[in-house]
Amino acid sequence: MNKTTNASYIVGYCTNVHAGEYLDRYLSSLEKYALDIKTRISDNQPLAVGLWLSARTARQMLAEDRLREFREFLESNGLTAFTMNGFPYGDFHGQTVKYQVYKPDWTQPERLNHTANLIRILTELMPEGSEAGISTLPLGWPSGEFDYRKAAENLLRTAELLRTNELQTGKLIHVDIEPEPGCILSSSGDVVSFFKDYLLPGRIETDVLRYIRVCHDICHASVIFENQQTAIRNYAAGGIRIGKVHVSSALHADISAENVQPVFEQLRTFQEDRYLHQTYIRQPGRMLSYDDLPEAISNANPRTAGTLRCHFHMPIFIEKFGHLKTTSHEIVDCLKNIRKISDCRHFEIETYAWTVLPDELRTDDLAEGIAKELLWMQEQLAKLKVFDQSNLKFEIWNT
């Protein structure tokens, strides 16, 4: 069991909700939204932000020697970069992202090079002696024969880079693999098997497990109906540490023969062209799975009765609306089990789908919505009393 009894817990939000394909646009988004959120939460305390930089933006920052400018912007505005999201490589706010978000995969040198750039940037932004993670895609999306050995080789090269980086700087960075429904690594079991079969054999396990960890996305586990405690225990049993938790909530619907039509009529309002929304329906004795929500809707009929979950990151404070619900209750379940089982201390709220929500749920004030999520999270932690409040840095409060 990996457990810590004296550590600061940091809660922040992921800035992949903001456009970041170009550096100046990303800085403008942070200035417009992050500073507004900070004012709404606690103007006198730092606000933790999980950075997202596209490959283009990361290259631009390094090539144009603008990293100091970026660091000074964060410091002068009371923003703390406590983690990075290295999953989306290209324009995450393009007209159509869908399957493109899984490219390049971990067999490609571009993925390795991008992650190396993020390591260089994050190292400069981190305080001395601190720890941070960079979440990354779960190898890729299945398409033909996948070269697991090549992906493992690139990840192990990254681990060696991280080891050297820590020895030189004293700063610990780990790459956190984020399983996602439908991907090559979809569940905790897939991740544990990949470590056991490809990452650990013939290598110093402590080095691998220090620098390659997992990002546990609550929504992703919920969509495939993987129990939060089961997933967390699977990682612990395999010696795999959770580098950070993505605090997220999925769409949920209880479907009967009588309510199929109204449920799917409401689900149609969630169809949109930008992101992939993997959808699973659990029925007695079987699981139906679809790459995207429109496929599930087109196959709806009275025999579709069951429990539906959809990979649509919902505002975490929403529990129910119309015929639909969310899996926000699983956030609470995850928090309880993380404290008991894991030494993870970074929690990143990752609701990136604000701009593609149905009209009745969309907000004209994005900063207000994100601030409400942060306050909801603070309220849940206070209710649970599973974290020692003297050690909880709800960042908003800094380490």
Image (tube, rainbow, N blue to C red):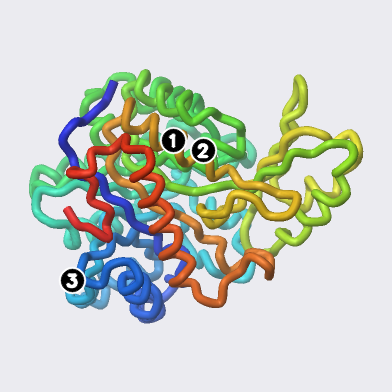
**x, y (%) of residue 252?**
66, 44
Mark 2 Cα shell of 10 Å, populated few (<14), some (14-19), many (≥20):
many
Measured Cα–Cα span from mark 1 to mark 3: 32 Å
Choose top left, top right, bottom left or bottom right for residue 62.
Answer: bottom left
**Given the current orientation, which residue lies at the most extreme front position?**
383
Q: Which dot marks residue 330?
A: 2
The amino acid sitting under disc 2 is: Glu
Q: Could you tell me if the residues under marks 1 and 2 are in contact, i.e. CB atoms within 8 Å?
A: yes
Q: Is residue 212 left or right of residue 328?
A: left
Nearest the eye: 23 or 319? 319
User: Is the residue 19 above or below the residue 118 in the image?
Assistant: below
Q: Pick whichever of labels 3 and 2 is earlier in the sequence.
A: 3
**x, y (%) of residue 291?**
69, 45
Q: Which dot marks residue 334?
A: 1
Tell me the SS state at disc 2: helix
Q: Which dot marks residue 75?
A: 3
The amino acid sitting under disc 3 is: Glu
User: Is the residue 192 above or below the residue 335 in the image?
Assistant: above
**Residue found at x 33% / y 56%:** 12
